[in-house]
């Protein structure tokens, strides 16, 4: 019952007998005290009547209110008469009528989730009293209707031309990146272009960059004139001259998994 009460009611009706209700309807046969919940003969049926409820699909209108009025009271605006199984014969006297307000689920803020019958002198916690029907008090439990709207779609990100030029991803169709991947070192007078050292600098391997057009043109033409402008030093020379032992680089390389190196 707890799982069923998580779904709003989509219909309230009256049945001449428990077996008279159609599929999808549930008859309230006992009160909260455990007594038989026969409403008596005040609803047009010889053998009395029973209150029944239904719970439909996600798109079915939900019950937002129920009123029990005398047969002389006018039908409230926005309400419909509760279904009756079977429909009483015309001209049969009825003392009370039950009216239901149905609202589309997307327009409903709250709805009825359960109906209960009790002794007239009893108070039912966490329930709202609708009125009296037959020899019983009629109670309902209301709650908010959860609306299942469409999932939010993230806005597409737009990348400006300037940001695209800063990307580290090398375009496959750009020939400039085929012979210019490596590491740049700056000595005392000039830049030095070296191929990546995978064991010493594995994290830098394969990072693309672009050389100055003067250097790039010389490299692509196969000229050795660029070497005359470079002061090439070994790692030992750099360590001795700058008193730098590449401790950070060696430590970073040692921490990487063997598969990365």
Image (cartoon, helix red, strand yellow):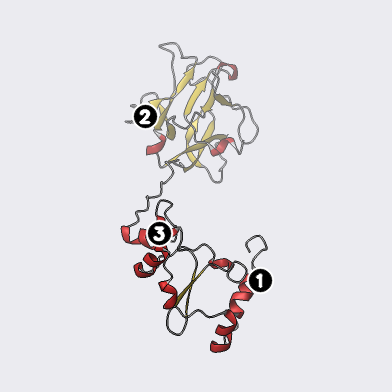
Please give the label number shown on residue 187: none
Quick check: marks 2 and 1 in contact, CB under 8 Å? no
Nearer-N-terminus badge (3/2)? 2
Tell me: 10 left or right of 239. Answer: left
Nearer-N-terminus badge (1/3)? 3
Which residue is at 47% across, 30% downward?
Answer: 10
Q: Name the residue under label 1.
A: 254
Q: Name the residue under label 2.
A: 79
Which residue is at 41% across, 46% downward?
Answer: 153
Q: What element carries label 3?
A: helix
Q: How far apart are marks 2 and 1 (CA)?
A: 77 Å
Measuring from the top left, give residue 140's x and y in whole percent. 50, 38
Q: How far apart are marks 1 and 3 (CA)?
A: 32 Å
Quick check: marks 1 and 3 in contact, CB under 8 Å? no
240 or 145, nearer to the observer? 240
Measuring from the top left, give residue 128's x and y in whole percent. 49, 42
């Amino acid at each position: 019952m707890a799982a069923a009460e998580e779904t709003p009611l989509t219909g309230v009706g009256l049945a001449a007998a428990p077996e008279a209700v159609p599929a999808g309807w549930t008859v309230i046969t006992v009160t909260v005290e455990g007594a038989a919940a026969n409403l008596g003969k005040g609803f047009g049926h010889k053998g009395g009547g029973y209150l029944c409820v239904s719970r439909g699909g996600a798109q079915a209108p939900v019950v937002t209110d129920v009123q029990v009025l005398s047969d002389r009271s006018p039908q409230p605006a926005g309400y419909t008469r509760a279904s009756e199984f079977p429909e009483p014969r015309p001209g049969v006297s009825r003392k009370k009528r039950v009216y239901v307000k149905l609202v589309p689920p997307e327009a409903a803020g709250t709805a009825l989730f359960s109906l209960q019958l009790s002794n007239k002198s009893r108070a039912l916690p966490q329930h709202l009293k609708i009125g009296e029907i037959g020899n019983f008090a009629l109670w309902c439990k209301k709650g908010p209707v959860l609306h299942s709207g469409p999932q939010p779609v993230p806005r597409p990100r737009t990348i400006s031309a300037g940001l695209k030029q800063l990307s580290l991803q090398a375009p496959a169709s750009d020939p400039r990146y085929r012979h210019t991947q490596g590491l740049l070192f700056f000595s005392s007078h000039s830049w030095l272009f070296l191929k990546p050292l995978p064991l010493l600098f594995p994290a830098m391997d394969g990072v693309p960059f672009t050389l100055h057009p003067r250097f790039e043109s010389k490299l692509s033409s196969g000229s050795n004139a660029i070497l005359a402008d470079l002061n090439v030093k070994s790692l030992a020379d750099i360590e001795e001259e700058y008193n730098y032992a590449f401790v950070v680089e060696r430590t970073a390389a040692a921490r990487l998994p063997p598969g990365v190196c």
